[in-house]
Amino acid sequence: MTKTKILLWTAKGSTTKYYGGPAIASYRLYRYRDHDQTELALAHASCLQPTDPQVFDEQALVYPMFFLDAARSQAGAATPANARDIELVRNRYENIVRKSLFVLKSRSWLAANAKRFDVFHGLGAHIDTLAPATYAEGFGLPAVISTV
């Protein structure tokens, strides 16, 4: 039997430790998948995404868009287990640059890897998922996007 190879695409990662909404929902969905019938790869932009080989067969940090704020961490004011540690945006323009770089890196990553998968499952209706879903389709990888 051939396994279905799923590419889960979510900039924020997929875990119950950080974030909310689609990240938690997708993690809960896929942790109960049939490993004999599916393979799951996670592509993301979070330096805080924990390694979880019981859920993900592989993980790829496409481009770091979300990361730990080192200054707050060194001051002892924050711990990685707290969602406040995620430095989402210092300012609006930095966020635009980070998202743009992630979208550009996404195209390159998908060009090199799309043929390995059977389906692209993107989370969220934002540019960091919509553009990669469009790239995936362009490379012959069917895409579906879910939101919460």
Image (cartoon, rainbow, N blue to C red):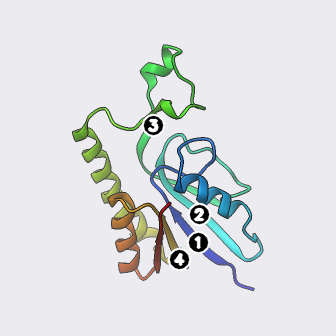
Disc 3: CA contacts within 10 A as few (<14), some (14-19) or many (>=20): some
Element type at marker 2? strand
Measured as percent of width and height from the top left, residue 131 is found at 33, 66
Measured as percent of width and height from the top left, residue 101 is found at 30, 51
Q: Are marks 1 and 4 in contact (CB under 8 Å)?
A: yes
Q: Residue at x 35, y 79 (%)?
A: 138
- Measure how far apart labels 4 and 3 are at the Cα level: 28 Å
Pointer 1 residue? 6
Pointer 3 residue? 67
Mark before the other along the chain sequence, 3 or 1: 1
Measured as percent of width and height from the top left, residue 129 is found at 39, 62
Element type at marker 4? strand
Q: Name above or below for residue 40 compared with residue 102.
A: below
Q: Is residue 70 found left or right of 128 in the rendered image?
A: right
Pointer 2 residue? 41
- Measure how far apart labels 4 and 2 are at the Cα level: 11 Å
> Hey, what amino acid is under mark 2?
Ala
Mark before the other along the chain sequence, 4 or 2: 2
> Hey, what amino acid is under mark 4?
Val
Pointer 4 residue? 119
